[in-house]
Amino acid sequence: MAEVKLAAQVRTDFGKGAARRARRADLVPAVIYGHGAEPQHVAIHNHALMMALKTPNALIRLDFDGKSELVIPKAVQREAIRQFLVHVDFLAVKKGEKVSVEVPIHVEGDLAPGQHVLEHVLNALPIEAEATHIPESVTVSVQGLEAGASVLAKDIALPSGSALSVEDDAVVLQVVAAQAEAPAEEAAEGEGEGAEA
């Protein structure tokens, strides 16, 4: 994954008022932590950060105060309705260092013919990977799977250098038979019979 370079500025004001002022100036408050160092408080231009975060687990190089820090997003807070960025926590990383992340699961292929539903037990796969080589996603084929079939974590091919951070037999996807609902008239008749008894 290519790294994205972003300019940041050091924050010296804290609290809700300072955060609101930063957001009015089109800046997103953020904190960088990791490697046992004191957390560093920065602010980053909203649009540039929003574009960088379109890629899950984006590798970002933040330049601020004459320093350069390689980071990945660990917690992204968004406003509930309009989804604008409110705050971001970054984890400082180094080349060669392993990190635990959740990688999106991309499904391809068609289930076996019939009324089957694919259930995502996990929406993302927890893995451990080198910080500078985090895969953007993992691909799982569900081609021809029938009701009752499951895809386990160990069944998913991982890029080299990546390892599972969940049990091998953890269910990631499962195929279930679609359940037909009883017609409303039959349900109503059943209720009437019960009431008479």
Image (cartoon, helix red, strand yellow):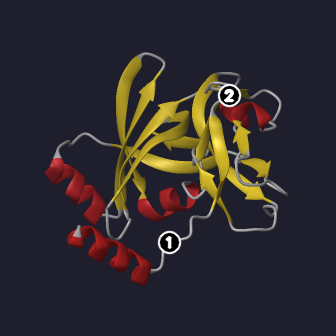
As measured in the structure, the alpha-carbon distance from the residue carrying label 1 to the one carrying label 2 is 32 Å
- Crowding near pointer 2: few (<14 within 10 Å), some, many (20+)? few
Closer to the camera in the image, 128 or 30: 128
Question: Taking 136 as reference, is 46 above or below it?
Answer: below
Closer to the camera in the image, 195 or 71: 195
- Position of 19 with respect to 26 (left or right) is left
- Position of 12 with respect to 54 (left or right) is left
Quadrant of res 191: bottom left
Which residue type carries mark 2? Asp
Quarter holding the C terminus? bottom left
Q: Nearer the viewer, mark 1 or mark 2?
A: 1
Whole-percent x, y for residue 129 in the image: 69, 29
Closer to the camera in the image, 162 or 165: 165
Question: Taking 152 as reference, is 117 above or below it?
Answer: below
Task: Name the secondary structure under disc 2.
Answer: loop
Q: Is residue 133 visible?
A: yes
